[in-house]
Amino acid sequence: MAKSTPGDYDAVREDIKALLHQPEYDDGSAGPVLVRLAWHSAGTYDAETDTGGSNGAGMRYEAEGGDPANAGLQHARVFLEPIKAAHSWITYADLWTLAGVVAVEAMGGPAVPWQPGRTDYVDDSKLPPPGRLPDGALGADHVRAIFYRMGFNDQEIVALCGAHNLGRCHSDRSGFEGAWVNNPTRFSNQYFKLLSGVEWKEKTLENGMRQFYYIDEDSEEELMMLPTDMALWFDDKFRPYVEKYAKDKDTFFADFSKVFNKLLELGIERDASGRVTNTDNVKGGYHS
Ligand code: CCH
């Protein structure tokens, strides 16, 4: 990996793309877990107290990284270490969010606008407490409480959850098991087609976790949905968006692009030229 000039984000993008192919890991791609890293780095945001969010890359510290919801994301961070070593000028907060965006597009998803400028300074008082991220075992009320806290509406929640086209659940991370779709390294609207189009049955895993399953007729592969995924289908206000995205892949891609960008920008203030203005929150904080 060649070193780059500070600010050469295209060079970083190229190196992220090159590391996505991981034949020994999961379904052969680092892409899904990188998307999850980007989302969890940002999804701690609380609009009311203006705490959490991707600024600061707080997951490097036990207070945030040790949240059980973040189990497994060390794999994503380790994948990115050689990139950070080669392009040492990029902040972790920018690298984690950029990796998610590059992975979505490289796996066949939409281009997502991305702006740099996040800092790795962490203000102690702004580190999010554990419990800010959603619990897959719960229902629509919980999903709304979590995402309304960040400032999203019902349509945006459904679009964001379409990321479950990618990747899988691991029994040693979340306790849930399996992938949502047959081809979990290809970004598409298949998740919505399955959610709306087939019959899901409930089951309890040996570890006591409750999830939903469907055996795909062609591949005989068992696919899964979390209780929170099913909640998008059972809820009268979420369901119309699931139906819309199942029928209209282009609208899903356009909406996902917008809302994923919004997620990664939570808590970041920019001036008219796009420069981040709240990077100096170092009071009593850590400095990487
Ligand atoms: Fe998710 N997600 N997610 N998710 N998620 C899991 C895996 C992925 C919830 C729970 C889980 C979003 C919303 C939600 C991804 C992206 C997004 C897992 C399995 C659970 C549990 C973890 C494991 O065992 O490894 C819940 C609950 C919600 C909302 O209520 C949103 C929003 C996004 C992105 C925009 C991706 C990608 C994965 C796959 C990760 C992998 O390692 O393959």
Image (spheres, grey):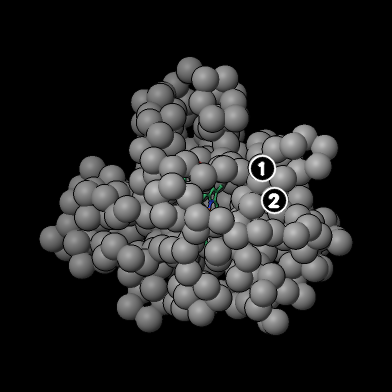
Q: Position of residue 182 (x, y in %)?
A: 71, 39
Are the residues at dot 1 and dot 2 in contact (C-beta closer than 8 Å)? Answer: yes
Q: Is residue 34 in sight in this rendering? A: no
Instruction: Name the one closer to the observer, 36 or 91.
Output: 36
Q: Is residue 218 left or right of residue 33?
A: right
Secondary structure at numbered mark 2 = strand
Q: Is residue 262 left or right of residue 96?
A: right
Q: How many marks?
A: 2
Does the residue tagged 1 have its C-beta within 8 Å of any atom of ligand 1?
A: no
- Residue most extreme to the left: 284
Task: Name the residue rendered at 26%, 65% in the picture.
Answer: 129
Instruction: Name the one closer to the observer, 174 or 276.
Output: 174
- For label 1, the crowd category at 10 Å Cα-Cα, with few meaning under 14, some 14 to 19 and many 20 or more, is some
Task: State the residue position of label 2.
Answer: 214
Secondary structure at numbered mark 1 = strand
Q: Quadrant of residue 183?
A: top right
Task: Name the residue rendered at 51%, 26% in the picture.
Answer: 25
Amino acid on which disc 1 is placed: Glu
Which numbered disc covers residue 222? 1
Q: Position of residue 98 (x, y in %)?
A: 52, 44
Instruction: Name the one closer to the observer, 88 or 140.
Output: 140
Of the image marks 1 and 2, the number of the one nearer the N terminus = 2
